[in-house]
Amino acid sequence: MNVSFIEIQFGTPAFDESIALRDKILRQPLGLSFKESDIEQEYAQVHLAGYSPSGEMVAILVLMPNEDGVAKMRQVAIDDACQGMGIGKALVEFSEIWAKENGVKTITMSARETAVPFYQKLGYTKTGRRFKEVTIPHYKMHKDLL
């Protein structure tokens, strides 16, 4: 599937779509939901979305840049019907291009244990020990973009 990627803005209808997609893929399977305080914290974060040729949002990724050249990747979600098509890889690569163009030198993340092999194939390194976040096992990971 040919997917186009763009940055979307907080508080727009596209942002609302991203909340719905992330809720469906990341939260509902764990019996969790977004709290208003979770959403409010995303105001200054970067939201990168992937759209199908028909205009449907099928992928979302959030970057949380800070002033020291590091950005935390979070809330990566690909619609169930589109998983396994290379969209996740393309979205991560798009986020890395955005990051480099905006002065980010390193991307970090807390990756779900099941996603670690995916990120390792994209050059991310697992660091530290396994830990629980949102009720499931995670690992810290990072990639230097230089």
Image: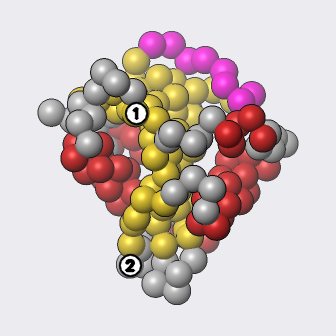
Quadrant of the drawing holding the N terminus? bottom left
Residue 75, x across and y down, in percent: 57, 44
Residue identified by numbered label 2: 2
Label 2, secondary structure: give it.
loop
Label 1, secondary structure: give it.
strand
Range shown magenta:
128-135
Residue lying furthest top in this view? Answer: 128
Residue 137, x across and y down, in percent: 63, 26
* Amino acid at pointer 1: Pro
Q: Is residue 113 above or below residue 21?
A: above
Residue 65 badge: 1
From this viewpoint, is residue 143 visible? no
Residue lying furthest left in this view? Answer: 146
**Residue depicted at x 61% and y 71%:** 81
In front of the other: label 1 or label 2? 1
Tell me which secondary structure the magenta stretch mostly adopts: strand
* Amino acid at pointer 2: Asn
Q: Alpha-carbon distance for marks 1 and 2?
A: 28 Å
Residue lying furthest bottom in this view? Answer: 54
